[in-house]
Amino acid sequence: MEQTREMVIAALDQLAATGVTHISRANLYLNPVDAQGKIVNRVGRTPLPDIDVPHPYRSAADEHGL
């Protein structure tokens, strides 16, 4: 997980280095796996939930009622 965190931060840093100051949205899909790389969809008997992090800022369309 640490490598994925570093990858996301590196991508944002590279984008910022180009002079980009805003992005509209970002989609990140993470597939949990066990140590052998097999897809995991539950921990113990508990199914893993879908995780949605709300966008932290209102879009221009939201600001203008579109």
Image: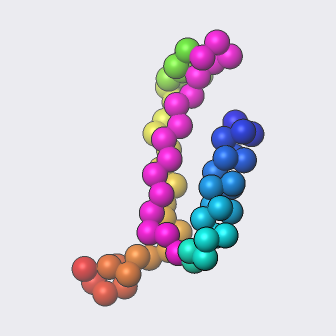
Instruction: Determine whether 62 is above or below 43 in the image.
Output: below
Instruction: Determine whether 13 is above or below 10 in the image.
Output: below
Quadrant of the rendered structure where residue 14 is? bottom right
Quadrant of the rendered structure where residue 43 is? top right
Residue displayed at 40% across by 76% down: 59
Magenta range = 22-37
Nearest the viewer among 3 and 38 is 3
Say if the magenta span includes residue 28: yes
Number of on-image labels: 0
Nearest the viewer among 56 and 19 is 19
Q: How is the image coloured?
A: rainbow
Can residue 40 be seen in the rendering of this structure?
A: yes
The percent position of residue 35, horizontal first and vertical second, equals 68, 16
Residue displayed at 56% across by 74% down: 20
Say whether residue 25 is left or right of residue 11: left
The percent position of residue 22, horizontal first and vertical second, equals 53, 75
Residue displayed at 62% across by 55% down: 11
Decide whether the magenta segment is chiefly helix, strand or loop.
loop
User: Which quadrant does the N terminus fall into?
Assistant: top right
The percent position of residue 31, horizontal first and vertical second, equals 52, 31
The percent position of residue 41, horizontal first and vertical second, equals 50, 23
Instruction: Determine whether 66 is above or below 29 in the image.
Output: below
Residue displayed at 48% across by 41% down: 29
Instruction: Determine whether 10 is above or below 15 in the image.
Output: above
User: Which quadrant does the C terminus fall into?
Assistant: bottom left
